[in-house]
Each structure stands twice: as structure tokens, then as C-alpha cells.
Image (cartoon, rainbow, N blue to C red):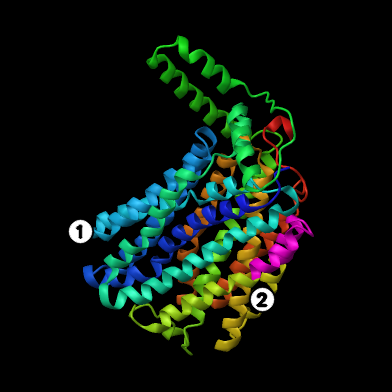
Amino acid sequence: MVGFGTFQGLALLFAGAGWLAEAMEMMLLSFIGPTVKSEWTLSPTEESLLTTAVFGGMLVGAYFWGFISDAYGRRMGIQGAVLVVAVAGLLSASSPDYKLLIIYRSLVGFGVAGGHVSASWFMEFIPTSSRGAWMLSLTTFWTLGTLMGASLAWIVMPGLGWRWLLALSSIPAFLVLLVSNFAPESPRYLYMKGRTTEALIILEKVALINRTKLPTGILLSDQNMDLDEENTQLDETPLLSSVGKERGYLETFLKSTLEIFSSNLLGTTLLLWLLHFGYTFAYYGIILMISQLSSGQKECGLITIHFDNVQDASLYIRVFITSFAELPGLIVAAVLVDRLGRKLTVEILTMFTFILILPLLLHQNESVTTALLFGARMFISAAFTSLTVYAKEVYPTSTRGTGCGLATSVGRVGGMVCPLVAVGLVRGCHQTAAVILFEIVVLFSGLFVLLFPFETKGKNLTDTLVGM
């Protein structure tokens, strides 16, 4: 009834700003590693640990922030994750040694992993008819963040160095944290918790901003736990009240975890785990292959990543080009996802990825290789983003954060494993073997998509498992 209007536009900017800030922090991995390696005389293994530490933090953080958003609210999850990104990002700039830098960057990864909470928050304000396309539009902010990160590095690194780059990159996260004080809680979350009065107040404000009117009446909810707690708190001591709240949060944790493994969701949960692993593995594999196979070296033994001199303009140009490669894919996905449905859209995009990688079984010239890999990145990123939309829709509000967070965590394992396999094979002059491996992963991912039990296109979000 409140429709899609000014409020949703502001919500998109807020959620997108969070993604932009997190993308800038992730983009730094392309620039600070070689510089720190030279300054502190690090081994190749120690340099690679800077990336592994970020993914390790994301592995833990995705599930943690998902649970926080289900137990304490979407807004709390967003604020907590952004706070960690901002503070850890700033502290990274003052790292006196390698060990502390590793710790701080792992904390940055821990915070960045909460980005899926912002997406869930935004989704719960979007009308059903246009939900898929608007969720995909959120991803463009990630691409903008990578472009801004590369631009900032291009300006700052040559003259001021990596510490200033880390410090300046934390500013967007602090700004998002400041603005988050004005962001409302998700009324769908409040309704699910039985806090109908608060939910109605927010809906009235949204309707006012959108210049629409709510229907007359009141909100009714079967979830009366929070209301009962509010009514009994006056008769309890502060200590007993605190103990009761902690017990309630523990029950929420256990309930949401058990729900994603219930008979209704078990098959979907396991498929989402496999697919998040597969698409993350393939996505980062394609990015690594772009760096390896598009390096311009004609002989396998000379193939290297041109990251040794971070002041070389070719590095920044390459980042710009590869980042732009994802935008056309997102446009295609946005057009298809609300017309053909989530499953068919993911399947089509995955098929095109498979086709574009196939010619790389044989060595191609540099231009053809670059074009094929850029096209593959375009489609695999769009397929993966469409899958995340489905994941958020398929889980009820009561367990959306926990379910999506756990699936994202499993996906991060693929991101950690991929560099070890992909870089090892390509650097070892085994391009065909690397391509076969990625093709197998992409093929099985496409087959697993077909196994999802139902389509979410045009369906309302559910709040509890009972409503499914």
C-alpha cells in the first residue's frame, strides 16, 4: 500500500552506500600487498595471507551478522558491521608491523561480511512486483565502490603511500555509520517479533514520505513474545529482566538455526551452500585468470601478474576495465529476473558463462582471451547476484539473516580455496586443466539450480516458517 517511492530511493542510497564502503575496503587488496611486501620484506606466502585473512574474517562474520540481524534487528546488524569496517580500516593505516596488519584486515573482512544484512533490510521495504530488479540495482554500488577504490589508489599511492590510502578509504564507512542513526528498523522484522505498534509507526512514516496512505485498521501478529516481555518487565528486577533477554536471544539463535535445517528448508539450504561455494569459486577464478592470462606474455613461463610496481598505471586501468565488465551483466539480469524468474535467469547466465570459458581449453591470442574472460565475468557475477536475491526471498523473515549468512560463509570457503588451485594451475602452465576445473564447477552449479523446489518470482515474502 505504501508503494515504491521516495523512501525506497533513500533506502537504496543508504544500503548502497554501505556496499560501496565495503567494496572500497576489499579493493585495497589489489594495491597494498605489493607495497607492504616491499616495505617489510615479506615472502610471497606472507603477502598472500593478507588476502586470506580478509576471507577468513568474512567466513566467520557472514554467519555472525546474520544471527545478530535476526536476534537484535536489521539495523543493529548493519550498524555493527559498518562500525567494525570503519574502525578496523582506520587502525590498519597505523599498523606498526605485519602481524597487527593481518589482525586488522581480518577484522575488516569480518565487518564486510555483514553486507548481506543491508540487502535483506532493503528487500523488506520493496514491493513484490519489482523486487528482483531493485535488489540487483543494489549491486551496482559494489561496482562503484571498486571504481572509487581504484581511483583513490591511483591518486594517493604514488605520493602518500599505502597508509594514507587505508585511512582515507575508511571515511565512507564512518559516514554510513553516522547516517545509520536515521535509518528505521525493518517493519517486517518488527512485525515478526510481535512489535506491531513500532512497525505501524514506521509504515506510517514511509507512507508519509511516499505521499500515500495506509488502509485503516491495526496490525495483528501471532508473535507475542516481545510484547509479553514488555508487559512483565515492570514486575521484574533489572537482573532478572537482563537474564530473560539473554535467554530470549539464545532461543532466537537456536530457533533460527534449526529452522534452516527443517524439513521445509533443508534441501534448499544444502543447495544454497553448494551454489554459493561454486559461484564464489568460479567468480574469483575468472578474475584470477584475467590477471594471469591477459598479462600480455606470450610464453607460459613468463606469465606473471603485473602488480610488482603499484605505481604502474596499467594496474589501475586493468582494475577499471574488469570492474566495468560486471555492469552489462547486471543490466541483463535486472531485465530478466522479474520476467523469467530467478531460477531461469540464473540458469541462462550460467550457461553463457560455460560457453564463454569453453574456447579457453585451447590457447587463444591475448585479445580473444581477454574478451572471453571479461564476458564470463559479466555473466557469472550476474548469475551469482541473482542467486543471492533468491536466497533472501526463499528464507522467512525469522531466519533470513541466519540462513543467508551461513550460505555466504560457505561461499567464502570457495573464495579461500580458489586462489590456491587457480593460481597454482595457471602458473604451472596448466591452463587447460584450470579451465576444465572451472567448467566442471560452472556446469554442476547450473545443474543444481534446476533442483530448487520452487520459484520466488511474484511471491510475497514470508515472515515465519509456518507461513511458507
Whether residue 94 is visible to the viewer of this picture, yes or no, is yes
Mark number, residue 96: 1
Image quadrant holding the N terminus, namely top right
Q: Nearer the viewer, residue 341 or 186?
A: 186
- Seen in the picture, residue 145 relative to 258 is either above or below; the reply is below
Q: Residue at x 66, y 70 (%)?
A: 353
38 vs 168, left or right, is left
- Seen in the picture, residue 262 relative to 170 is either above or below; the reply is above
- Asked if the stretch drawn in magenta spans residue 165, the answer is no
Mark number, residue 356: 2
Q: Residue at x 53, y 46 (%)?
A: 117
Q: Quadrant of residue 336 in the image?
A: bottom right
Q: Evaluate if marks 2 and 1 touch, with contact meaning CB atoms under 8 Å apart.
A: no
Percent position of residue 62, x then y: 49, 47
Amino acid identity at mark 2:
Leu
Magenta residues span 329-349
Mark number, residue 413: none
Q: Quadrant of residue 45 in the image?
A: bottom left
* Helix, strand or loop under label 2: helix
